[in-house]
Amino acid sequence: MDRTLASPTRTKTRSIVRTVALAAVLGVASGYVIFYGVFPVSGVPASGEASVPWMLVLLGVTSVLVGLATENLSEMIFEVFIGLLLSGVVATAMALSPMIVGVVFVSPDSVPAFLFHYGFLLFVLGFVVDLVGTSTGLALRERYFLRRRRPLAVGSERK
Amino acid sequence: MGWVGRLASRWKYPEQRVWFLVAGWAVVLAALVVASSASYSSVILAHTSVELTPSRTVSFRGTTSAGALLANGSVNLTVTLTVLNPSSRSLALSSIAYKSWIEDLPMETGHAILSRTDEVVTNETGTYYFFKAFLGSLDVVPVPIPPRGSGTVALSFVLTRNSDAPRFGVVQEITAYAAQVRGNGTVMPWVHWVQVAVDVRDLPAPGPDANPFLSSLIRIVLEDGPNLG
């Protein structure tokens, strides 16, 4: 069916699903980065200290790709903020992952506070890179995808 | 049209191609998340599952027939430590701290001659005094403990007049008193405490500026026995 003929409800639902899906991708990337930054020795790749270039590449690539798949600015803003929340969820889930194999080693309540305490700068880094990266992706999308599809419309608007 | 065909038809549109890239990248991220979680879980599992099985033997050399320690005698503490590693991590036993106390009968009965500081233990059967005869800590040549395997280290410590005259003197007094009142100076009860540090060998060492909890993550500390003080 042509997208222009889709009902407003369906369009809205698609937009919400798309926003949540892309926010989840941002959340997974930022959550991994927070976990890796706090526990670099037991992460993959394991290192004595967290590699800032590695974290920036992961966050940058993710956010630009998400920006390229984002349709408009309001979706992008929602994605970044939902992604920020999801990053905390993902990092906490990773830190509590030993519970899957039945190992309860700390009080689960203390893990989010612990990660927030030691990973606060990583939360900020993730948020900023996500904001810049998705904006860049959205701009690239506008530049390369959308303009190609409506050259005549732009021309007729100018007349 | 099968799912391959449907995917191929979507590849024609640049906007759809981006979704392929996003999906592929999400798989990469998910793999990193799963691998990191698994690695972290295996370290935590090692922390909670590694077991220390110590055995100690105290022997006296150079005693009277009643077991009183002579001035040229010695007390030998042999500690055998076996660390069982049920985890998938490669470990290595790297350092040991130990303390051993002998029950101080002369202090308990008020017949002590030499001055010393004892640890006092009170339980339902009474009050007991313990004298710290052995203590120390040392780094050892790392003893490898393979995944799902075990590692054993045996150490021997000797107390003589030359090695530590004040402690030796007190132990000598205790054995002499025990020989006098119990008929055998070498039967006094001992209390042992041992702490071993086991390093996770297949993880990188944290950097110098790293948070202390990272050091404790790659170092498993195991204890056995009561630490009287």
Image: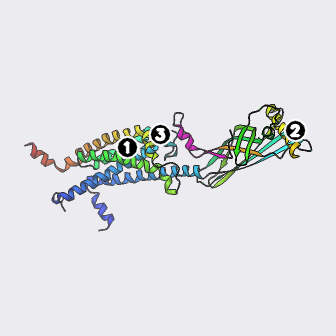
Q: How crowded is mark 1: few (under 14 residues within 10 Å), some or many (20 or more)?
A: many
Q: Do the residues labelled 1 and 3 touch (CB within 8 Å)?
A: no
Kindly identify which residue carries mark 1: A59
Q: Return the x and y of residue B189 as percentages of the image width and height.
A: 78, 46
Task: State whether residue B32 appears in this view.
Answer: no
What whole-number distance in Å separates the C-alpha atoms at marks 1 and 3? 14 Å
Kindly identify which residue carries mark 2: B73
Tell me, yes or no, whether dots 1 and 3 are on the same chain. yes
Is label 1 in a helix, a strand or a loop?
helix
What whole-number distance in Å separates the C-alpha atoms at marks 2 and 1? 69 Å
Q: Residues within 10 Å of mark 2 (few under 14, many from 20)?
A: some
> Which residue is at a point 46% across and 53% down the rendered structure image?
B34
Kindly identify which residue carries mark 3: A50
Looking at the rendering, the stretch of residues picked out in magenta corresponds to: B197-226
The residue positioned farthest toward the left in the image shown: A159
> Which residue is at a point 62% across and 48% down the rendered structure image?
B91
Is label 2 in a helix, a strand or a loop?
strand
Chain-order first, disc 1 or disc 3: 3
Q: Which amino acid does label 1 sit on?
A: Leu
Say which quarter of the image contains residue B65: top right
Q: How crowded is mark 3: few (under 14 residues within 10 Å), some or many (20 or more)?
A: many
Q: In this view, does A130 lie to the left or right of B40?
A: left
Of discs 2 and 3, which sits in the foreground? 2
In front of the other: B22 or B145? B145
In front of the other: B102 or B83? B102
Q: Do the residues labelled 2 and 3 touch (CB within 8 Å)?
A: no
Say which quarter of the image contains residue B136: top right
Q: What residue type is labelled 3?
A: Ala
Q: Return the x and y of residue A95 as percentages of the image width and height.
A: 47, 48
